Image (tube, helix red, strand yellow):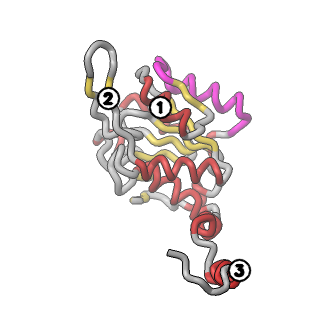
Amino acid sequence: MRCRIPLQPRARRIALVLMDVDGVMTDGAIVYLEEKSELKTFDARDGVGLWIARRAGLRTGLISGRSSAAAARRAAELGMEEIHLKTRDKLATYVRILRRSDLADSQVCYIGDDLVDLQVLRRAGMPVAPSDAHPEVLSRVPFITRAAGGHGAIREVIDAILKAQGRWREVVGWFDPGPAARGRAARRDGGRART
């Protein structure tokens, strides 16, 4: 992640990660199918990142100006706590979320990619834009992912937050318990290799 200011002091405080949908969770493409259906693609790495965030105790959510059955379904699959679609005023929605959650701006990371996200980006303690965000957004946020929207930007942000919070070794341990645990497992199996 490219940082104009130190990341760790901001990332350490984060308890809630909010984001836009089109251009952040997706690459921004909207494909209309027959009738009223639309097609969106979501990055599996972002999905794993959001699952990890939830397991690590971070809350997550969406604030989008568009209504999308696909985004609602994906958010529900990932267990996102805040799902706000077809929002006319993103800042008002953001303020309601903070009041209801008893959180301060400093505890929120917001990932946005376009002009409609600027008011929330200005308020959030950790404002982030994907690398392919609108130039006006890129010029105003202190944190810019190396990944583009819909291509791992969310995962990059979540990894950075968990590393800053000193949780990364724990997260990796969920998937690779280390030599001591592997040794115990091998002894239980009588030294037989697993294939």
- Answer whether residue 88 is magenta in the image: yes
Asked if residue 73 is positioned above or below residue 2 in the image, the reply reads: above
N-term-proximal mark, 1 vs 2: 2
Q: Observer-nearest residue: 122 or 156?
A: 156
Q: Position of residue 38 (x, y in %)?
A: 32, 24
Residue located 63% across and 86% down the image: 191
Helix, strand or loop at label 1? It is: helix
Circle 1 Cα neighbour tier, 10 Å, few/some/many (<14 / 14–19 / ≥20) = some
Which residue is label 2 attached to?
39
Kindly report the distance in space between the C-alpha atoms of the residues bearing marks 2 and 3: 48 Å
Magenta stretch, residue numbers? 85-103
Residue located 66% across and 80% down the image: 189
Residue located 71% across and 80% down the image: 188
Q: Position of residue 52 (x, y in %)?
A: 58, 53
Asked if residue 153 is positioned above or below residue 65 in the image, the reply reads: below
Question: Mark 2 and mark 1 in contact (Cβ < 8 Å)?
Answer: no
